[in-house]
Image: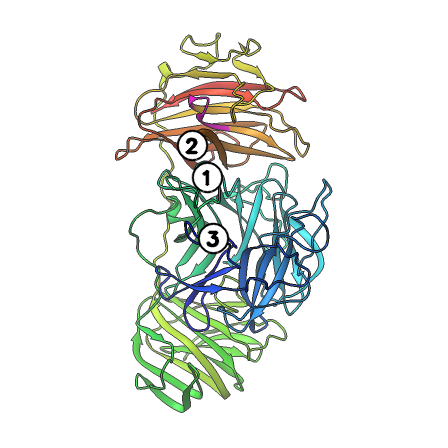
Amino acid sequence: MRGDDGLWYAFGTSDPLREGERQAHRVPIARSADLADWTYVGDAFAPEQRPSWAAPGAAFWAPDVRRVAGRWVMYVTVTDTTVSGDTFDTAVGAATAPTPAGPWTFAEEPVVAPRPGGGGGYLWTIDPSQVTDPAGRHWLYYGSYYGGISVTELSPDGLRAVGTPTLVAIDNKFEGGYVVRHDGWYYLFASTANCCAGPATGYSVQVGRAREPRGPFVDRDGQRLDVSRAGGTPVLTQNGNRWIGTGHNGVLTDLSGQDWIVYHAIDRADPYLDEPFGINERPMLLDRLDWVDGWPTVNAGAGPSEGTRAAPVTTGALDARFDTADLTGWRAAGSWRVDAGQVTGTGALTSRTVAGGDVRAEADLRLSGATTAGLRLGRVDVRVGAGRLTVRQAGGASAQAALPAGLDLADPHNLAVEVRGRDLVAELSPARLGDQLAVVTLRLARPAAGPLALLADGGPARFDNVSVARLYRPVRHAVAPPAVGRLLPGWSDEFADGLDPAWQWIRRNPAAAVSGGALRWPVESTDLVGTGNTAGVLLRAAPAGDYVAETKVTLDLGEDTVRNYQQAGLVAYVDDDRFARLAQVAIWNTRQVEYGYELPFAGQPVYGGSIIGTPATTTWLRLAHHVDPASGEHEFRAGSSRDGTHWTWGAVWTFPADTTPRIGLVAHGGAEPPVTAEFDYLRLYR
């Protein structure tokens, strides 16, 4: 987030920051002027600083920092409390500070107290994220795999949960919620799968949207996030480069109006901070967040970047921080002066910098006596005051939106104005974090061009961090999904008359047989994960080069009941300790499409996975194979579909260049209750 000083701040979980350090931090804080080069500022909390209700050994995880009621509030997971002897009776605490750098002071009571779980222990009350709605109500999202993600309304000071919480994303699939409001929708970003499985980490970010903070949130295909067969549109997932486990995100907006996603990931060549199977090394990454057809996606769907990229815009043609008393670049009408890094005055203070074309202008402002204050861009005035955000073009049209009742404009707020052609959008927010209090749009009679002016009427207003920058260019189209191409009959099997002779068994299952035009395979009480390696695997050779393997599998797993971990699907297989398995699977009360991955590392097999789409009873699965021209690695990207027509594409797992992966089918994970997987075909395309 951006602080009052115009610098950017990042806050982290209480892990060591560097290899060899071996010392946990107490919410480390980093600061940057350009979002690229960062400096460690210090920890938010002293070694023995904790709220009275926190146990002595408590750690602080997943901080979320917002401006609430005119001050900075940090919502943070407290991992151990005095409520019980359980060392993971987690709660959400809050701390307040006058600046993002501190000093931070804990509130006396938890925002969300530990919650006993119906299955024993305590629900995972972690990963808080706050948002303020246009009515001025504050909301807090929190939760994880044990208990799901819930939202609760907060008190006006943001420090207490009030009312009844609402489940918005199901347990055993989602954590790390983060909500932004965009074009009238609330978008719930949530992470899924394991954050910290070393070289097999498949953490990723999915999204759903709703018209209200309490949901229901649905994905692009209309699938809800709070049901057993939960939806989730992919936003960010690994693409085969060095970065895996791309998840637990925040969102920020640069001075051009471009959105960016900040997240952590793992370098698959250096997955641990120190020794193998110790702390996962998860650096902070930043990538462009695009909005295509109403849905967020990273780098137009290309996924995490590697190498040199265009940086965020953190300065503009006008970039006034008022660090000195010099106002020679401005023309004053009325009384204006610089004091304590801000400019205060009444009347109009006009920049000598002329803006034209598509631009974004913004300022932090507070009304310290003014009845209205705002910005003038050319001949367009944008003002806040008298309970309204108002846009008015001289001699032309106007538009306005109500501000929240009781909003105190003496507290700092950010006013941003974007002009693209003749379309203007103005918004007021607490701190530029996607939770607008009011948004106004206006079709201008003519493009806004001219100098930027600061306006204050009826008394003084204070301004800071005033900027004008060229407006970003939106991405309109996502990158193309893998091309399927023509059918390769010689590499395919329709299961019309027994098994094709090209098939080979690993641990043959005599109960699996072809009948009625399908391979019918009773799900085995076996598995491939770890060192057991008891599952049957039906394999055939794959062609060289790029291809897509597809199957259609019917597996009636019902919903909501626990039947761990019955599954059936596709596998790319080198051996029992190196494979990628794409299957519809029962994971506790949920039904998911998991893209699991195992590889040998430091002398033992390591397993992780990613989540791809939403299964139906009959689900179509694809693995798209590509050979990296530089490394020779085999890359397998996974896709799933509920109807065989509309596909969701997700993560990439890789195999070394000197391996020869085969393609196959599996059906295992548990024999109770009995269920049979039916495979209609295996088809390969190029």
Q: Residue at x 50, y 13 (%)?
A: 507
- Position of 121 with respect to 457 (left or right) is right
Disc 2 target residue = 601
Amino acid at the residue labelled 3: Pro
Q: Nearer the viewer, residue 413 or 358?
A: 413
Disc 1 target residue = 198
Amino acid at the residue labelled 1: Gly
Residue 426 position in % (x across, y down): 46, 69
Residue 291 position in % (x across, y down): 43, 52
Which numbered disc flags the more N-terminal residue, 1 or 2?
1
Q: Nearer the viewer, residue 346 or 191?
A: 191
Amino acid at the residue labelled 2: Phe
Q: Is label 1 in contact with label 2 (beta carbons under 8 Å)?
A: yes
Q: Residue at x 55, y 18 (%)?
A: 678
Considering only vertical position in the picture, is 486 above or below 355? Answer: above
Task: Tell which tag, 3 or 1, sits nearer the viewer.
Answer: 3
